[in-house]
Amino acid sequence: MMSLVKHSTMQDDYLVLYIPGMCGTWLNWLVNQHDNFPQYNVSLKLYKNDLEERIPLDVGCLGGDWYIYKHMKPDFRSWGDYIRDIKHCGLSIHHSVRTTDLQGGEGDITPEIFLNSTFEENRHIRRLGEVNNESFIKDSVKVLCNHGCFNETSQTDKLYTVDKELLIKIKDDMKPKKIIVPIFNTADDSILKRWIMFRAYHTRVRASTFNSELINCKTIWQNTFDLIMQENSYGTDVHYVDMKKLISGDNDEYLKLCEALDEQPIPNIQEEITSYRDILSNVASHFDRISQKNC
């Protein structure tokens, strides 16, 4: 019988907050691979590039999701209620697919989880069956669908601002031991290029606007991080991860993360980093080929 995801008052919970596109799902998955964490599965979301190759565009960590709102309802769903919802409907989840396809240009995603449940809101309960370490005493999640606890923005806004009321509600409710925040290094465009390609396959960003989108996105990200650091928007118990350094294999940056988690390094950490770096590089190459054609 499939075991239930546990949660106890003795468990240390961590929270990953990030700007959409900042590789937060992968970072959350990586955090969860350490010895005392659940070691959730990773899923690859594939798409077909201009060379007719089916390659990863994104990754998923279904176990590390916390949907703070019930489906089609504005009511805040507490961490405790979310865990209880998982336990209530958990046994109705019977199958998980590790690889999905993003249909190029259309933005349709093949469902990754099939449910027996007839409750629409239970489609978001995806943590069961994703745990590989049932003796975990720590857990890390990202917030859905507002990854960074941001206020609503318009197309003319040049930065995201933290919704302090929502952040306080989440922190008071979950009481995370530490918040993990990936930060942007302007020296690395591969993260930005992957995000623009991701958006192109979901919102039909036109190829002719790719370069201007790159500049605009870089401005928004940099402005947002400058404000977050200046105002200490997420509080004091925060660990910032330089994603450029981490993804490039900088061991010192990774060891800082281990220290923040109070965990031993993952033995094959460089292999895991290389695998994700290859995903970014391949998608960035696709971006470059399209941009050159539209110059």
Image (cartoon, helix red, strand yellow):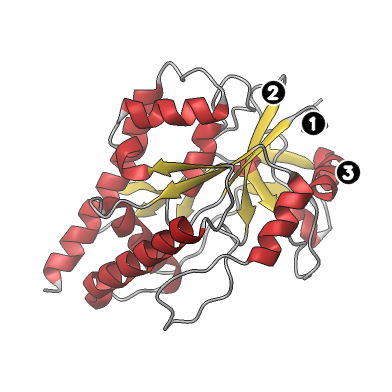
> Few, some or many C-alpha atoms within 10 Å of disc 3 (few <14, some 14-19, many ≥20)?
few
CA–CA distance between discs 2 and 1? 9 Å
Q: Amino acid at mark 1?
A: Lys
Q: Amino acid at mark 3?
A: His
Viewer-proximal residue among 248 and 163 = 163
Could you tell me which residue is drawn at 59 percent across and 42 percent down? 237
Q: Which residue is mark 3?
A: 88
| SS at badge 2 | loop
Q: Position of residue 256 (x, y in %)?
A: 43, 29
> Few, some or many C-alpha atoms within 10 Å of disc 2 (few <14, some 14-19, many ≥20)?
many
Q: Quadrant of residue 131?
A: top right
Left or right of residue 64, residue 206 in this image: left
Work out whether mark 2 precedes mark 3 in sequence or the reverse, and give the earlier one: 3
Residue 256 in view: yes
In the displayed structure, 254 sits above or below 106; it is above
Which label lies toward us, 1 or 3? 1
Q: Which residue is mark 2?
A: 136
Left or right of residue 170, residue 238 in this image: left
Left or right of residue 94, residue 240 in this image: left
Q: Position of residue 230 (x, y in %)?
A: 45, 59
Viewer-proximal residue among 168 and 129 = 168
Q: Which residue is mark 1?
A: 6
Callouts 2 and 1 close, C-beta under 8 Å = yes
> Few, some or many C-alpha atoms within 10 Å of disc 1 (few <14, some 14-19, many ≥20)?
some
Viewer-proximal residue among 164 and 189 = 164
CA–CA distance between discs 1 and 3? 12 Å
Q: Amino acid at mark 2?
A: Phe
- Per the rendering, the mark at residue 229 is none
Can you say which quadrant of the picture contains the C terminus?
A: bottom left
